[in-house]
Amino acid sequence: MDGPSAPGGRAAARRARERRGRGEAPPADGEPLTGAGAPGETAAPGGRAAARRAAASGRGRRKRTEASPVSAMDGHLPDGEASGGRATARRRRTSVPAAGREGVGGPQPAGAWRSDDEGGHLSGGRGGGYPPAGADVGPYPAGQDPAPAGRAAARRARAAAAGGAEGDRVAARRRRGERPDALRRLVPQALVVAFLAGGTSAFIAGDKTVQLSVDGRPRTLHTFAGDVAELLDDEGMAVGEHDIVAPGPHHDLAAGDQVIVRYGRPVALTLDGERRQVWTTARTVDGALRQLGVRAEGAYLSASRSAPIGRQGLDLDVRTERTVTFMADGRERTIRTNAATVREALAQAGIGLNGQDTTSVDPESFPREGQTISIMRISADTETREEPIDFPTERRQDPTLYKGTEVVVQRGEKGVQRVTYALRTVNGVQQKPKKVSTQVVKQPRAEIIKVGTKARPTTVQGADHLNWGALAQCEAGGRPDAVDPSGTYGGLYQFDVRTWQSLGGSGRPQDASSDEQTFRAKKLYVSRGASPWPVCGRKLHG
């Protein structure tokens, strides 16, 4: 085209798009046009406004190219016209002379461009398409009279272009003022959405489903606990040293885990007579016996096997089955029993105790495993015997008698007593009789003896000058207690008992002192001379 670009023309819109593509700012009103336009061409105020509107509105309307056929014209129509709607486009096209115009597909006949008012699409004759990029759609040169309808349309276009430029500047100022406020409103909302999304993800990730079984009663829980101890704490469950927790309290929890808790129960157990305190996590007597390793087959139980054991515990008496052997009446008998006493086991074995019969162990004692017990058959009787009672001896001092002289004044007599004994026979063998009673029939009579206290003379007239030491040495070797081999003679001078007592001696001569024996020998010499010592008598004069 030779003339200047019409205000709001397509050439201005095209050049605005090219500058926007290169990142340049739209030209100001009255600034010479550069780029694809003719040299020396200046941008009309309406064209510059149209270019700016095209630059501002083209970005917002790119997505409409696929939704509406009108958006397809954004590459050929100025943005101001595109945003103005199809009516502005129709008005501009109706003002363009038909002669000399070229469509997209080549030269078009006059009046070929028209508006499809019903469908809202633009078409160019039979070939369709849009005006060429450089087509003149604005005022015409002097001397060229457009049709009346075209001139009216051109005036309206120029008025619309002038008003549109002012509106664009107002809209731009409004957008510059509103965009920070909109961003300030969007940022908190976005943060809230992000926080909620993150919190929801953390909530979903921390929640886990586990199964908790307490004393055999399982239940499914949703928990945020990290380990078993925290789970039990959340559930208000306290466990002690006798309780079982599996897995352990410090085990980390994961989804699908199973936690088992078994509470301990105290049991006062009396097992085969021995009492002790034990703990079990079993809930029944049978489970407790298995857990404690107690053999329950054939055992006596104070409570049923199916009896429950509460948290407070239970008293349980258990007597296991044992092997016991009895030896009775010459026979051996072995049984299996859970009896509490030997007497009860005897009854189970069919062995009776009669009279004073008993067992080798206490009949009330607890029978042990492998124990052998003897039955003692006992028969009892009594026997009475008469037995003598020894008489007592009473010794009385007599000053008229020489020392060493004793005289029996009263002879003693034994008494008589009747004694009763219990005779016991065990399994046919008689035991030692046992004295059970004593009755005195005759009292014994005491024997009275006078004992001399008078000093005995040490000399005998007519015999003191003799050698009595030589005689004693010859008869007894000088030994006062010497006794001959026959036992008839004794002492230093070998007295017989009869001669000794006739001389006033008591007892046996060998039991008397040396002085007394010498004194009695001197008396014997005075009365009989040396004849009592036929062999050694000559020593007296030696």
Image: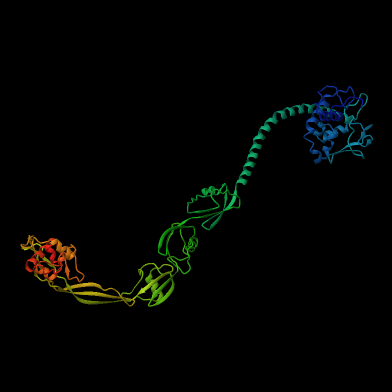
Q: Position of residue 280 (x, y in %)?
A: 47, 58
Q: Is residue 537 left or right of 176 when viewed as pictured?
A: left
Give whichever of 405, 383 is nearer the camera. 405
Q: Position of residue 395 (x, y in %)?
A: 11, 65
Q: How is the image coloured?
A: rainbow
Q: In the rendered view, would you say 213 is above or below 386?
A: above
Q: Is residue 294 left or right of 199 when viewed as pictured?
A: left
Q: Is residue 375 visible?
A: yes
Q: Position of residue 289 (x, y in %)?
A: 48, 63
Q: In the rendered view, would you say 388 is above or below 54?
A: below
Give whichever of 531, 108 is nearer the camera. 531
Give the position of the N terminus as an image quadrant. top right
Q: Is residue 436 left or right of 313 when viewed as pictured?
A: left
Give the position of the C terminus as an image quadrant. bottom left
Q: Which corner quadrant of the image does residue 56 belong to?
A: top right
Residue found 62% across the figure and 46% down from its top: 205
Q: In the rendered view, would you say 66 is above or below 519?
A: above
Q: Which residue, as the protein is rendered here, is positioned at the far front?
A: 542
* Circle count: 0
Q: Is residue 156 visible?
A: no
Q: In the rendered view, would you say 276 is above or below 327?
A: above
Give whichever of 450, 72 is nearer the camera. 450
Residue found 82% across the figure and 36% down from its top: 86
Q: Position of residue 188 (x, y in %)?
A: 64, 35
Q: Is residue 351 left or right of 468 when viewed as pictured?
A: right
Q: Which corner quadrant of the image does residue 273 belong to?
A: bottom left
